Image (cartoon, helix red, strand yellow):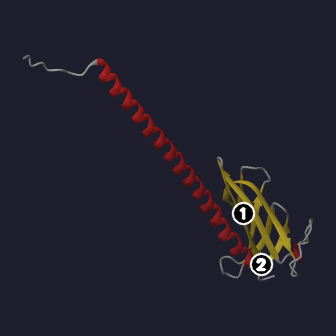
């Protein structure tokens, strides 16, 4: 009897390489899909977080307003004693009306972006009887301000609505 040591044939080697390529392709597809899902959720969380912080700040400041000086569909200007020093500061929330531009807070000459890429932003105003005021709004009639903002980053978007009753008017 002959004791013959036998190695892999070329056909067996090609079959193993084929299965390895298929296996790596499946793993790559799973990795790529999960990476996209993670990135999408992270983007969505970021949009929600930034917009949520803005919608925490804006109503809080508007509730302390001592007067509303301008009430437009894309901006509101009011005075409030935010520092607690007895002196009112003028604060303005303004959006340019162009999709993708920030919703800004302007106070003391300093502009801060509250929502980086707003697709839309609208302010609506109500009187003391909760009646919707039509434009042009008489600022002295405003008792409640409603805010609607749609923020986007890439293909992710988030809409938020809030309102603030001005307590000091």
Residue 14 is marked as none
Sequence-wise, the earlier of marks 2 and 1 is 1
In terms of image quadrants, where is residue 143?
Answer: bottom right
Q: In the displayed structure, would residue 128 be above or below residue 104?
A: below
Whole-percent x, y for residue 155 in the image: 65, 47
Q: Can you tell which quarter of the image residue 6 is in? A: top left
Q: Which mark is residue 165?
A: 2
Outermost residue to the top: 2
Q: Nearer the viewer, residue 115 or 154?
A: 154
Let me know if residue 155 appears in the view. Answer: yes
Q: How many marks?
A: 2
**Horizontal and vertical percent position of residue 14:** 34, 22
Q: Nearer the viewer, residue 113 or 21?
A: 21
Identify the residue under disc 1.
Answer: 106
- Residue at image point 57% right, 50% down: 40
Label 2 – label 1 distance at C-alpha: 21 Å
Other-residue count near label 1 (Cα within 10 Å), few / some / many at <14 / 14–19 / ≥20: some
The residue shown at (44%, 34%) is 25
Comparing 85 with 50, the one in front is 50
Mark 2 surroundings within 10 Å by alpha-carbon count, few (fewer than 14), some (14 through 19), many (20 or more):
many
- The answer to whether residue 36 is left or right of residue 70 is left
Q: Residue at x 44, y 38 (%)?
A: 26
* 2 or 1: mark nearer the eye: 2
Q: Which quarter of the figure is the N terminus placed in?
A: top left
One can see residue 88 in this view: no
Q: What secondary structure is found at the residue carrying circle 2?
A: strand
């Amino acid at each position: 009897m002959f004791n013959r040591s036998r190695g892999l044939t070329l056909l067996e080697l090609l079959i193993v390489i084929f299965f390895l390529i298929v296996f790596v392709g499946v793993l790559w597809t799973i990795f790529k899909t999960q990476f996209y899902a993670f990135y999408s959720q992270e983007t969505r969380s970021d949009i929600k977080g930034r917009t949520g912080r803005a919608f925490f700040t804006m109503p809080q400041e508007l509730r302390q307003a001592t007067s509303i000086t301008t009430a437009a569909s894309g901006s509101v200007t009011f005075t409030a004693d935010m520092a607690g020093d007895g002196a009112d500061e003028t604060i303005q929330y303004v959006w340019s009306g162009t999709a993708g531009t920030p919703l800004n807070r302007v106070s003391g000459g300093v502009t801060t972006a509250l929502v980086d890429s707003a697709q839309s932003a609208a302010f609506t105003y109500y009187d003391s009887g909760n009646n919707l005021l039509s434009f042009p709004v008489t600022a002295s009639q405003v008792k409640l301000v409603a805010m609607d903002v749609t923020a986007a980053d890439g293909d992710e978007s988030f809409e938020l609505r809030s309102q603030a009753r001005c307590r000091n008017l």
